[in-house]
Image: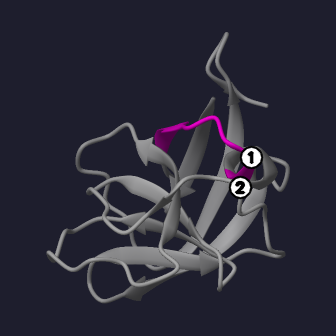
């Protein structure tokens, strides 16, 4: 499944992993998130409610990864790798940005589903 993230009028797509956490996240869409910066490596936002923790946990990430951090409940998008591992309980990977160099910023981001047949928002 694909989602569209719209930041300052620019749209980026992401491809999501099929797991219970991702399906629960999708159930919240469309959604406007207020993104903040953390450690100069990720943009994160608080979700309106906790989502399922039934995805595979990881302690590492790659640039472009979209992840759920269950103690938050927060969603994060990693834009820079600083070599640090994610502390326990780790993150649940939910997907990856399709663009290699998406320019993310703090502030409002609109997340919506994409109808993969015609590329329109669903």
Q: Quadrant of residue 96?
A: top left
Q: Is residue 43 left or right of residue 121?
A: left
Q: How is the image coloured?
A: one colour
Q: Mark 2 packing: few (<14 Cα in 10 Å), some, or many (20+)?
A: few
Q: Which of 43/88 is in front?
A: 88
Q: Residue at x 38, y 37 (%)?
A: 98
Where's the C terminus, which quadrant? top right
In the rendered view, tell whether residue 24 sits above or below residue 83: above
Callout 1–callout 2 Cβ contact below 8 Å: yes
Residue 108, image x, y percentages = 60, 73
CA neighbours of label 1 inside 10 A, class few (<14), some (14 to 19), many (20+): some
Provide the residue designation for mark 2: 54
Where is residue 78? Give x, y as percent.
Answer: 35, 65
- The residue depicted at 26 percent of the width and 84 percent of the height is 40
- In the rendered structure, the answer to whether residue 90 lies left or right of residue 1 reads left
Give residue 25's position: percent from left, percent from top. Answer: 74, 54
**Residue 64 at x, y = what percent?**
33, 53
Q: Secondary structure at mark 2?
A: loop
Of residues 13 and 93, the one nearer the viewer is 93
Q: Nearer the viewer, residue 90 or 74?
A: 90
Q: Residue at x 71, y 63 (%)?
A: 53
Would you say residue 20 sits in the magenta stretch? yes
Residue holding disc 1: 20
Residue ranking furthest to the bottom:
39
Give the CA separation, mark 1 to mark 2. Answer: 5 Å
Q: Residue at x 19, y 69 (%)?
A: 81
The magenta stretch spans residue 38: no
Q: Quadrant of the N terminus?
A: top right
Which badge, 1 or 2, is on the more N-terminal residue? 1
Q: Which residues fall within the magenta stretch?
A: 12-21
Mark 1, secondary structure of its residue: helix
Q: Residue 116 lies in what quarter of the image?
A: top right
């Amino acid at each position: 499944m694909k989602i569209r993230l719209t930041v300052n009028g620019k749209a980026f797509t992401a491809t999501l992993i099929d797991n219970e956490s991702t399906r629960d996240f999708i159930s919240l869409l469309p959604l406007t998130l207020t993104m903040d910066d953390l450690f100069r490596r990720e943009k994160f936002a608080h979700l309106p409610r906790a989502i399922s923790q039934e995805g595979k946990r990881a302690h590492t990430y790659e640039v472009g990864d979209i992840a759920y951090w269950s103690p938050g409940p927060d969603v994060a998008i990693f834009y820079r790798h600083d070599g640090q591992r994610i502390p326990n309980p780790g993150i649940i990977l939910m997907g990856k940005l399709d663009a290699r160099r998406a320019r993310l910023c703090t502030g409002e981001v609109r997340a919506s589903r994409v109808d993969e047949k015609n590329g329109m928002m669903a």
